[in-house]
Each structure stands twice: as C-alpha cells, then as structure tokens.
Amino acid sequence: MTGAGHQRDHKPAPDAGEVEGRQRRLSVLAKAPGKELLACWKQTGLDPSVELLRGPESGLVALRGRIGGSGQPFHVGEISATRVTVRIGSGQVGHAMISGRDVRKAQLVAVIDALAQDPAQADLIERDIIAPLERLAEEADARLRSETAATRVNFFTMVRGED
C-alpha cells in the first residue's frame, strides 16, 4: 500500500565501518566483567529514559565448531545467554546478547549500544566506557599470555649419531 499512513521511514544502510565499529563495541561490552562495566557506566553520569522492547529473555544457544576451522561442523554444546532490546528517549534502539543470565548487565549493554548510536553521546561512550574496558581486556590477555609463557615446556629431539 502506498498511503501516507503506510509509508515507513527508511534509514540508509550502515556502511561497513559503522557495522564493524558496532560489532567491536558490542563485543567489548558483552565480554566485560559486570563490575567493571557498571563502574565505567556510573562515571558517565548518564541516565536516559529507557523502554524495553524485547526481553530480557534467557535461554540456551547452540555452539558449533569445526576441526581445524575448515572441517565438518559439529555440535560443541550449549551456553546460556540473555538478550534484550531497548529504546532510549532520543529514539535510538539498542540490542544486547550476552553469555550467562545477568539480566542487569544485558540491559545495560543494550542501553549503551543505543546511546553509542546517538551522535551527541557516541564520543563519550567510546572514551569513558569502551576504551577503558578494552584496555582492561588487553591487560588481562597480556597477564594470561605471560603466565602461560612461564609454564611453557620446549621439547626437542636429539639426533643420535651412528654407533
């Protein structure tokens, strides 16, 4: 139908850079420990009005794997996950899907996702939430690599000469 009441506002499709940026942001938020995420959030002083559009819903997500990354897919198991969709007062819609059943964390990730899409808040979100959480994750990874390297055993083969 083409009546005025049936027309939809179509947003232009996001470019690849926007999609990659949002994927990175959501990955950082989903992997962040809840305590650190909440601490960064509180420092911003933001308090938008929030409307729940879907969820929060908790359930299981099936995990698939491949031997060597290219073999036949196989069922690894399931992981519990929580998803939620929100709309903030300025109209942006945020989504979140996190592992586990932390409903508060899932809602906070969705709110931050929505705020990051608001040009007026995007820089604040990146500077005060995403960048510090990314640094914490990199430091944790470096510590783990260091601890792992300290326990590494190097095996070698000695070639015996002819008797």
Image (cartoon, helix red, strand yellow):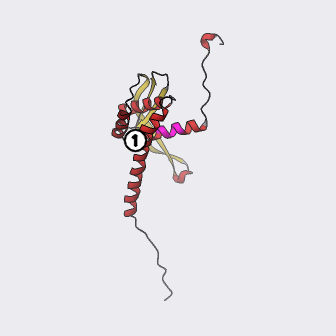
Q: Viewed as shown, does residue 70 lie left or right of 121?
A: right
Instruction: Work out whether residue 102 can be spotted.
Output: no
Question: Mark 1 is on which residue type?
Answer: Ala
Label tally: 1
Question: If the image is split into quadrants, where does the N terminus sit?
Answer: top right
Q: Which residue is mark 1?
A: 32
Q: Nearer the viewer, residue 43 or 152?
A: 43
Q: Which residues are magenta?
A: 21-26
Judge the density around disc 1: few (<14), some (14-19), many (≥20) Cα neighbours within 10 Å.
Answer: many
Where residue 116 appears, x then y in whole percent? 48, 32
Where residue 95 appears, x then y in whole percent? 47, 30
Which element type, helix, strand or loop, lies under badge 1?
Answer: loop
Residue at position x 52%, y 52% in the image:
67
Residue at position x 56%, y 36% in the image:
19
Q: Viewed as shown, does residue 39 lie left or right of 71?
A: left
Where residue 125 appears, x then y in whole percent? 45, 35
Where residue 103 appears, x then y in whole percent? 36, 31
Residue 82: quadrant of the picture: top left
Q: Viewed as shown, does residue 52 lie left or right of 21?
A: left
